[in-house]
Amino acid sequence: MQPLVKDAENPTAEPKPSAEVTPAAPPPARKGVPRLSAERLQGLAMALVSLSVGIGLWHIATAINLDFYINFSNVPAPWKVFSAFFAHIQTEIFWTHIGVSMRRILISYSIAVVLGITIGLMMGRSRIARAFVMPYIEVIRPIPAVAWIPLAILMWPTEESSIIYITFLGALFPIVLNTLHGVEQTPEVLVRAVQSLGASRVAVFLHVVIPAALPSIAAGLAIGMGVSWFSLLAGEIISGQYGIGYFTWNAYSLINYQDIVVGMLVIGGLGTASTAAVKLATSPMLKWQKRAR
Amino acid sequence: MLDVLKFKKPDTALANDADKGRIRISDVSIRFGQGASAHQAVESTSIDIEAGEFVCILGPSGCGKSTLLNAIAGYTKPTTGQVTVDDVKVTGPGPDRGMVFQQYSLLPWKTVYENVAFGPKMAGASRTSAGSVANTFLGLVGLKKFGNRYPAELSGGMQQRVGIARALANYPSVLLMDEPFGALDAQTRLMMQESLLDIWRKFGTTVVFITHDVDEAVFLADRVLIMSAAPGRIIEDVRVELPRPRSPEMASTPKYLEARQFCLDTIRAESRKAFAAQNA
């Protein structure tokens, strides 16, 4: 139930691939059991009311077969979707779909994190590296994941590797650009300060440049995770035999409409959960920022 | 108010080598840019600063006093001439010359304690010995209790005290201060000046202190070097004959007022000249 609720909250799902740097979001979770303050309870209650209203309207629209410009006659009712969901979570194949998608994300995203941060740091510290790499970023970044599919299938030996490639590419650019941006923001006075304390070039990098870039890198990692789901789904819809994107598209081909919505909600839930996981993983490194406020 | 005064450790744990920290600025000029856009920041300047002296460089904004300080620190390479500290030529920044900046320059991602221990660690000290040095100097500036805070959780004055502790933790022979109290409010500023003199008395390092505030310069310094604007050069070398330790009450003594008036007159005459030159 939990992923469903979370998803309905944010139906527009994934952030667009973008060079824009979002400020590092507040930490999503605390250690231990979160205390339910009155404020929190109120927020939770309001979210529940809001979702109930949305589901209620959805139910009414399907019950009366609303056909006013948008057509609800083929949209499954909420209860149908939920019962389909509960039926699916008891089958093994459904978990295989989810597992395959998660594995693809894990592989592509890990490669993107390592390469993206490395490239970003290099570009930030070396004018030559920057001049060399920037044109590729400018040219390749605006190409949407879907547009890569035909070439990726032709280029890569297996379908699996082409899907991973497309997913990787989606995550890569936000990570590179945010890392670069973060490095560029290193305050010069801090570099000078540690130089006068005897810091070597390596020490300046480790103790000033990287920590100064961390908030921006963390934001890039969160955006990159969102975009990698976005790209994965594109890859899975067109090629592949497993994966939650395939499941969703296949449901459409089989005229199994409630499964389309099940797939969508699961995608949204997984995307939200993995972005939250990234934020949770990066928050210990940003402890100093939190306490500053 | 100032915990500094309650500092219990024997001064020998702190006191710097009395013979160290002699600064010789020989024929230093600094020019930025090339060709038509070239800008002479400092005109041929020679100064000797004795070990353990407290020297203020006083001048209007943009007169090149920070540039001169940066040459001592090693951030800026002189166009001509050289700077030596204890007969060693300055070629770059180093831990023998501690630096305190006007802007807050503590590493925001390190705690106060880690910031102060940073220098000793860079010098290869073990974790424990770097830690005990950090504690000693945090005690010296009266902030031992705040070791586990992050810089942003401290007030501006406290942050600058940590900055001083951090610079001193390397036992520098010279402490370079670039308008360190410029961003503080008037009350805090006065407290910080007293606190600095107290630290200096215990630690006994050479101090070169940049300021545009005449009162600050006269209250703190043994010598006030007055700098003219564009191109910067030292036009007066004023000795302040006030006894030490100094207290704010001295601001009404004739000696203080005399030194203060002389500095103000010099600066005014210089500004008038500069103004006339601009309108010529």
Image (spheres, rainbow, N blue to C red):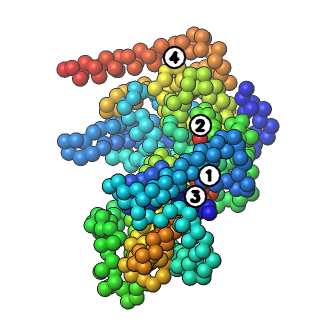
Residue A163 visible to the viewer: no
Mark 2 vs mark 4: in front: 2
Task: Name the residue carrying label 4.
Answer: B259
Is circle 1 on the same chain as circle 4? no
Disc 2 from disc 1: Cα separation: 22 Å
Judged from the image, the secondary structure of the residue bearing numbered disc 4 is: helix
Closer to us: B247 or A38: A38
Image position, residue B133 (x, y; %): 71, 49
Quarter of the rendering occupied by the N terminus of chain B: top right
Q: Is residue B124 left or right of residue B218?
A: right
Kind of residue sitting beneath label 1? Lys
Could you say which quadrant of the image residue A74 lies in? bottom left
**Residue at image coords 46%, 26%:** B212
Kind of residue sitting beneath label 2? Gln
Q: What number is the disc on residue B160? A: 2
**Residue at image coords 58%, 75%:** A88
Kind of residue sitting beneath label 4? Ala
Disc 3 from disc 1: Cα separation: 29 Å
